[in-house]
Amino acid sequence: MRVLVQRSDKASVIVDKKVVGKIDSGLVLLVGFTEGDSIDNIEYLAKKVVNLRIFPDENDVMNKSILDYGGSILSISQFTLYADTKKGNRPSYISALRGEESSKLYDLFNEELRKYVHVETGIFGADMLVNISNVGPTTILLEK
């Protein structure tokens, strides 16, 4: 499981010209799954995300988590996090977990995050337009 975390002051996801998810301040998560991912991976990475200290404290040092700082999460499924270009310029996605299994894990991951913070999502499997205003820029890859 891979989660690309970006600190954001505004983010939205649009499907068929309609906003389906939107946050002001918080985190944008791009989430991908692979064979062997489990509920343990989900619980571990959800806790890691909400406790990741990448928000500024009163001294402008990245020392606060989203739990301390406040804000919401916009979670987007993204199988392309498992792109492999070792054999050329056309990415292979063989390592990405397929459809139904990945969709179930994505839903479980968002449910786990909702135990801690408000979560907005895109639509699994849809062609999405994701707008991210990345603060910092702060972008961190988490993997389990």
Image (cartoon, helix red, strand yellow):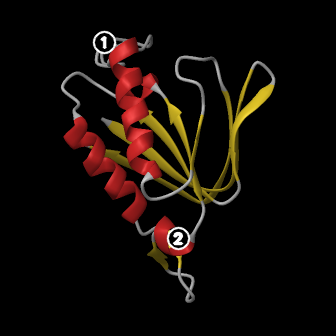
Instruction: Report how many numbered discs are placed on residues in the image.
Output: 2
Coordinates of residue 102 in the picture (x, y in percent): 36, 22
| Residue 72 relative to residue 3: left or right | right
Residue that numbered label 2 is attached to: 55
Q: Residue at x 53, y 82 (%)?
A: 57
Q: Position of residue 98 (x, y in %)?
A: 35, 13
Q: Is 141 located above or below residue 77 in the figure?
A: below
Q: Using the image, determine if residue 117 lies above or below residue 130.
A: below
User: Can I make out residue 114 in this image?
Assistant: yes
Q: Nearer the viewer, residue 12 or 103?
A: 103
The image position of residue 39, as x and y in percent, is: 24, 37
Cα distance between the residues tagged 2 and 1: 35 Å
Q: Which residue position is annotated with label 1?
A: 94
- Above or below 8: residue 82: above
* Residue 83 showing in the rendered view: no
SS class, disc 1: loop
